[in-house]
Amino acid sequence: MIKVLIGAAFLVGAFVPQLEAQRKDPAKSPDSQQAVQKDAAAKDEGKKDPKPLTPQQQYTQLLKDHSKAMVVHRRAYTQAKTAQERSKILRNNPAKEFTAKFQALAEANPESDTGLKAMVWMIRNGRANPLGVRTAMRLIEKHHVASPGITAVITSVGRSGANSENLLRAVMEKNPSQDAKGLACFTLARALMMQNRRAKADSPQLKEVLALMKRVQGEFGDIKYGRKTLGAYAESTVFELTKLQVGMDVPDIVGNDIDDAEFKLSQYRGKVVVIDFWGDW
Amino acid sequence: MYPHERSLVKRLANEPFALIGVNSDKKERVRTAMEQNNITWRSFWDGGSTGGPIASKWNVTGWPTIYVIDHKGKIRFKNVRGPAMDKAVDELLAEIKSESGK
């Protein structure tokens, strides 16, 4: 089930640039009209060299170019007639080509915010290019562990699937922002938890997860995360690791059944009980 | 899942055994699912979403998630599926019998 959900999330992710690109019809959007006017103005001014684009402008341009390339890519995919054609098109995902362009931009401006944005793009679009993810992770580790801008991207780093452990530890140690430290601590704990789902609670890995989550509760509990706080999320993992392990007494559950009648798990003491968290999907 | 659980519940109808659900669906959907799939066992209704209070507290992030509890209230197995679930339950039922036989 989880796999299906993750798959769906990737699909949504893959379609977003396309949708955005469609919304902005290039022929009609004010941006491109301005661009056309600017081009015309440049011509009028005569033979002056066009001003080189700033890194930020280059970044924006790359985003636009990538959106356009994705539109073409998706169209080719829907129009493909055979499975063979489709898989060939999928192998030529524009993200591959654009990873190299964003990487060039990042390496030319490694210390700047724009450089960081380009690195983050490489991570968020890394499915077509895992090598790009590792490169971006190295660049961030080298240049941005103490940047304030890192806070907004830590979750993406943690979800990239690549080994983000060193980077997250470095952010915890070196970033001056509480938000960045807290998020890195939580993200590291969650990544380690996912990697060690089947380990025993007293294994060194899960002991570290517990220590990190307790640190989140103690030092970073009030930081907002989604609709809740880091503290609330950390509490669930601490509960699982300290109360829900094999050999422990099961905590009681008190709740209502679907007809609103209250009942308790402990009513079934004396019986063997299978607790099944389920949904009809 | 349903056919396996149905057969488990049916097979152990006369044993000290209970299957207890924690359901994350909207209410109408659980009702329909229970009717259509002949689900006779009881479920806690967890507020209609996967972020419900019980699933959140128990840190459940994948469905189904399974816990097997012995007659003394100890957690003995996690996430056993299919034949492994049957084996786990049978093992724990045998413990009850051997204790009462002493």
Image (tube, rainbow, N blue to C red):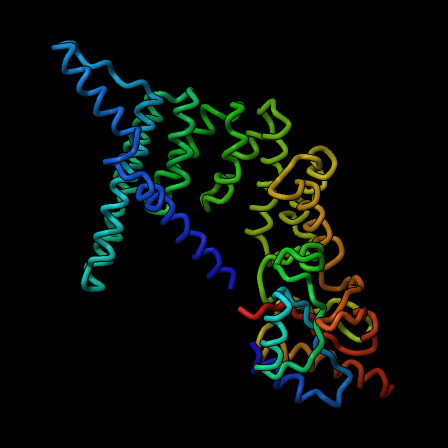
**Image location (x, y in percent) of residue B20:** 71, 73
Decide: is A15 above or below A150: below
Kindly identify the residue that appears in the image at 26 percent across and 29 percent down. Answer: A32
Q: Is residue B6 above or below residue A90?
A: below
Furthest-left residue in view?
A47
Q: Observer-nearest residue: A101 or A23?
A: A23
Residue A84, horizontal then vertical, whole percent: 20, 62
Describe residue B4's horizontal placement relative to residue B75 as left or right: left
Query: Residue A197 appears in which quarter of the rendering?
Result: bottom right
Left or right relative to B34: residue A77: left
Q: Quadrant of residue A224?
A: top right
Q: Is residue A211 above or below residue A82?
A: above
Which x, y percent locates residue A86? 23, 58
Q: Nearer the viewer, residue B44 or A40?
A: A40
Can residue A200 be seen here? The reply is: no
| Residue at left offset 58%, top offset 24% | A174
Tell me if I can see residue A187 in this picture.
yes
Residue A155 image position (x, y, % from top left): 52, 39
**Residue at figure coordinates x 70%, y 77% from the top left:** B19
- Is A279 on the left or on the right of A219, as rendered? left
Seen at 42% across and 27% down, the residue is A116
